[in-house]
Image: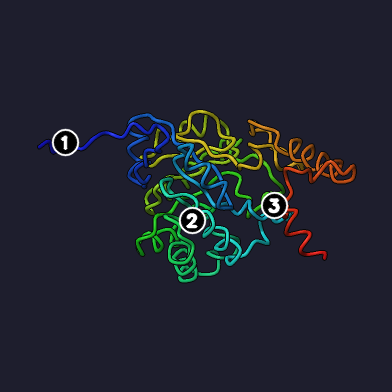
């Protein structure tokens, strides 16, 4: 009697990917393979990204602007971030999930930083956290990593410091600023960060940092010399119309598609084309006669 297990010929079956981890990130950097990362804030988007094969999903504090409609990232709270993190965690099972620590969730004290980082894993279903800043955040990074929580750093344009930076401005464009940024990258590496986002910094500088540190760099507006790339999904899909950063490539224009769908719906309802017979539930003639007699 044969003991060979038959191979399924159902091509519609999806092969389950191995879970992406911090080790995966490091191995991809060592092999020179690009790391892909996108933001998500809800279940269906996370599920679609995971199915597409993205390496990592960031539940970004960009939620504040592209989903909640705030002027910048500062107003979003831990509770709001956790609410959306849980939705993403339900949708994505293979990508590494990173929770973006919101403004004032880690700046007050190291103890507060560790507690809130832990909430992202314990209550939000995340695999790691991200926080902004360099040398001034080294103690918090060490403590969070010491608690067993992977930390992704973030240098360059740090949106939570938008008022201090004088707006959403590129960073590291002078020799002194570039030197400080490079030093901060080394400090975060030594503090135990597993990777580093470089946002809106000169491409030459980002490539130099990427080659000089052992942890992977994830660029956004930092050129192709980084070890990976991240974009805000609403920018990539053309869903956020207020402004589009220079470094964004739009891969779709969903805002225009949504506008067309909504106007078509209004027109169909007003002209009585919708709902049509095929969208309607009916009773049999016998039951209707019984009802009205």
Q: Position of residue 284 (x, y in %)?
A: 72, 53
Image quadrant occupied by the C terminus: bottom right
Q: Is residue 4 above or below residue 152?
A: above
Q: Residues within 10 Å of mark 2 (few under 14, many from 20)?
A: some
Residue bearing mark 2: 90
Left-right relation of 206 to 284:
left
Q: Which label was assigned to residue 65?
A: 3
Relative to the observer, which residue lies in front, 8 or 78?
A: 8
Count the labels in the image: 3
Q: Quadrant of residue 138?
A: bottom left
Q: Nearer the viewer, residue 256 or 70?
A: 256
- The quadrant in which residue 143 appears is bottom left
Image point (36%, 35%), residue name: 28
Which of disc 3 and disc 2 is earlier in sequence?
Answer: 3
Q: CA distance from mark 2 to mark 1?
A: 35 Å
Label placed on residue 127: none
**Mark 2 or 1, nearer chain start:** 1
| Mark-to-mark CA distance, 3 and 1 | 55 Å
Which color scheme is applied?
A: rainbow
According to the image, label 1 marks what residue? 4
């Amino acid at each position: 009697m044969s003991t060979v297990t038959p191979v399924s010929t159902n091509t519609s079956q999806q092969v389950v990917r191995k879970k992406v981890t911090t080790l995966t990130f490091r191995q991809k950097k060592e092999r020179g393979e690009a790391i892909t990362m996108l933001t998500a804030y809800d279940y269906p988007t996370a599920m679609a990204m995971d199915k597409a094969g993205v390496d990592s999903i960031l539940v970004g504090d960009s939620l504040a602007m592209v989903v909640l409609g705030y002027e910048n990232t500062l107003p979003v709270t831990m509770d709001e971030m956790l609410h959306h993190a849980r939705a993403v965690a339900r949708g994505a099972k293979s990508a590494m999930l990173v929770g973006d620590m919101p403004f004032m969730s880690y700046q007050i004290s190291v103890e507060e930083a560790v507690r809130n980082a832990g909430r992202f894993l314990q209550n939000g279903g995340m695999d790691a956290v991200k926080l902004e800043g360099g040398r001034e955040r080294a103690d918090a990074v060490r403590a969070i990593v010491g608690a067993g929580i992977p930390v992704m750093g973030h240098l360059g344009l740090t949106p939570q410091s938008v008022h201090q930076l004088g707006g959403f401005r590129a960073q590291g464009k002078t020799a002194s600023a570039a030197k400080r940024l490079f030093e901060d990258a080394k400090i975060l590496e030594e503090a135990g960060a597993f990777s580093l986002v470089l946002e809106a910094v000169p491409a030459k500088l980002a490539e130099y940092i990427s080659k000089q540190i052992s942890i992977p760099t994830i660029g956004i507006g930092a050129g192709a010399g980084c070890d990976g790339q991240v974009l805000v999904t609403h920018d990539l899909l053309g869903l956020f119309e207020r402004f589009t950063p220079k470094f964004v490539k739009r891969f779709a224009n969903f805002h225009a598609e949504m506008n067309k769908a909504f106007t078509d719906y209004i027109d169909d309802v007003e002209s009585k084309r919708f709902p049509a017979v095929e969208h309607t539930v009916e009773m049999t003639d016998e039951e209707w006669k019984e009802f009205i007699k």
